[in-house]
Image (cartoon, rainbow, N blue to C red):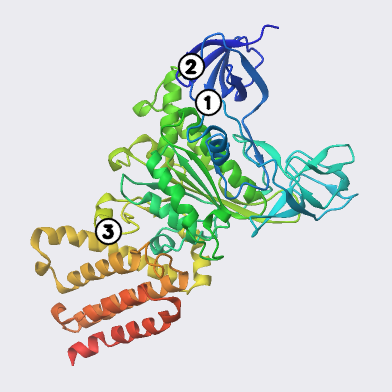
Amino acid sequence: MTAPVLTRVTGALAEAQPLREASLYEVVRVGHRGLLGEVIRVRDDVATLQVYEETTGLEVGEPVERSGRALTLPLGPGLLGSILDGVGRPLERLAELTGDFVQPGARAPTLDPAARWEFRPRRQSGDEVQEGDVLGTVMERGALEHRILVPPGMSGRIAQLDAGQFTVTDAIGRLVDGTPLHLAHDWPVRRPRPVGARLPDDRPLVTGQRVFDLLFPAAEGGTVAVPGGFGTGKTIIEQSLAKYAEADIVVYVGCGERGNEMSEVLREFPRLTDARTGHSIMDRTVMVVNTSNMPVAAREASVYVGITIAEYYRDMGYRVALLADSLSRWAEALREIAARLAEMPGEEGYPTYLSNRLGQFYERAGRVTAIGGPAREGSLTVIAAISPPGGDLSEPVTQATLRVAGALWALDASLANQRQFPAVDWETSYSLYADQVAPWFVQATSPDWPDLRRTVLELLQRGQELRDIAGLVGPEALQDTDRLVLESARIFRELILGQSAYDPNDASSPLGKTHELVALAVTLHRRALGALQRGLPFERLNLGPIRRSLAALRGAPASEQGERAAAARTLIEGLGAEALS
């Protein structure tokens, strides 16, 4: 049989023949340097290849070597704390091999083959095991119990299972039929991992950000779109979520972002301290990095690498948050590849299957019961940033995302310019999970949580309407009750929903503190409204000390919150009576 060779090279795409037997998405090695590529189309005996590395220097006639399998990722201990490129190669190891610039054809295993892990078995010889069963555990980065699973599709009776120190390539045991058991197993990144059953979206992902937890909650296992233009704070929000959200594992995918932004993220993440353990946030984080100057084809693969890792930890029974920044760059990679394939373009040149691909990606999120035993629940929450040109939410990527995402956290540049953080536009944002997770919030805080949320949304909406009117006629021309609504909306916007990412006492807000602040602000509005209805002029409402007391409560350490809350409550209760006396 004639060996396949390159017949055409154009950018990240190449053609080779004869490859009649090649499978779609099969991985190939291209050229004398062995560049990593993937089959994305087969016509007769000509295969179109998507090359994940820089193709400069490739020549027609160079050989193409088939692998016989799709793009796969080894899953096992050693993933936490790693920084991978778009196809799963560890960047730190690549830097040791090739220097600061990744050389085409460079190879490095995702998992360190020399690292040894202390394996503690939970099964023994003679046990029958099914796919997903927990064979045993190793401790990863000293704090997390990494559960070694029977790979999907494998089952049988254990003939041998040893305790001790092993590398990811060592056999820790075998089945009766001779199948070896390892600490790691491979999985094709484009295929969703199997689950036992999907669970309802009735538990929230508590983020520590008041505007999200109160107004636009995300469900554990839900999907959230975060569109925003340049400078609206997407990266700061994702860092805050990585640090404070109630997730056991964080997978951060930097997809097509500028190199200087990604270098800042790579510097900042190791410095972040996990609020729960006091250790580095990297102890429970995996980063997949593919900057805008890296090959565009690998950008398209990076989100699948990230979500495969997230599914793996979900199957262990952990709560996983996948932070993707940004899906707009991923969609641009799809558009570029589709253009080179001369496919029929859709809106703004994006491929017509953009919505389908986005839907398939988001469908991999969810709260599930894992296959195998012992019984365990895990969740994978997808929070994806979108970078619409000029902040235009009507562009195709945002609109396709909104059809499948369960929550929208729309960021507004004007709010960001006013130093509002998070710069969430509450008129545009929404959450389809709010009613489903409301009973959980009621149980965790107080029965009045849904009423407080409804009141805040109404005041913010009415406040925005009155701001537009006041801009025309001036606030003094408004009725006193309307002026109070304006002031209450301002208090909610600046003191309650706004947070300081740089204040250790305000960067994260526990649910109890969020409820206390919101309840006090709502009580303030209602007491002030009662005073106005009893004939007190708006000018005589002495709101300044109360505003300062709420600000003091917002920035108070946990040990002083009770005292500060009591002081604010005393001022609020005396508001009308003191002014009328």
Where residue 419 is drawn, which disc sits there? 3
Question: Label 3 to label 2, Cα distance in Å?
Answer: 49 Å
Q: Where is residue 460 drawn, in percent x and y? A: 28, 63
In this rendered view, identify the residue nearer to me: 166 or 533.
166
Reading the image, the residue beneath label 1 is 104
Q: Position of residue 196 (x, y in %)?
A: 69, 48
Comparing labels 3 and 2, the label whose residue is closer to the camera:
2
State which quarter of the image contains the C terminus. bottom left
Task: State if disc 3 and disc 1 touch (CB < 8 Å).
Answer: no
What residue lies at 31% left-to-right and 38% top-to-bottom? 389
Q: Residue at point 31% right, 69% down? A: 495
User: Mark 2: which secondary structure?
Assistant: loop
| Residue 57: assigned label | 2
**The one of 200 and 562 positioned closer to us in this rendering:** 562
Residue 112 sits in which quadrant? top right
Question: For the point 43% across and 39% down, which residue is it?
Answer: 327
Residue 581 seen in this snapshot: yes
Q: Sequence-wise, which precedes: disc 1 or disc 3?
A: 1
Q: Is residue 476 above or below residue 231?
A: below
Residue toward you, 152 or 91? 91
Quarter placement of the N terminus: top right
Q: Secondary structure at mark 3?
A: loop
Q: Identify which amino acid the numbered label 3 is placed on.
A: Arg
Toward the viewer: 454 or 106?
Answer: 106
The alpha-carbon separation of the residues under discs 1 and 3 comes to: 44 Å
Work out whether residue 343 can be spotted: no
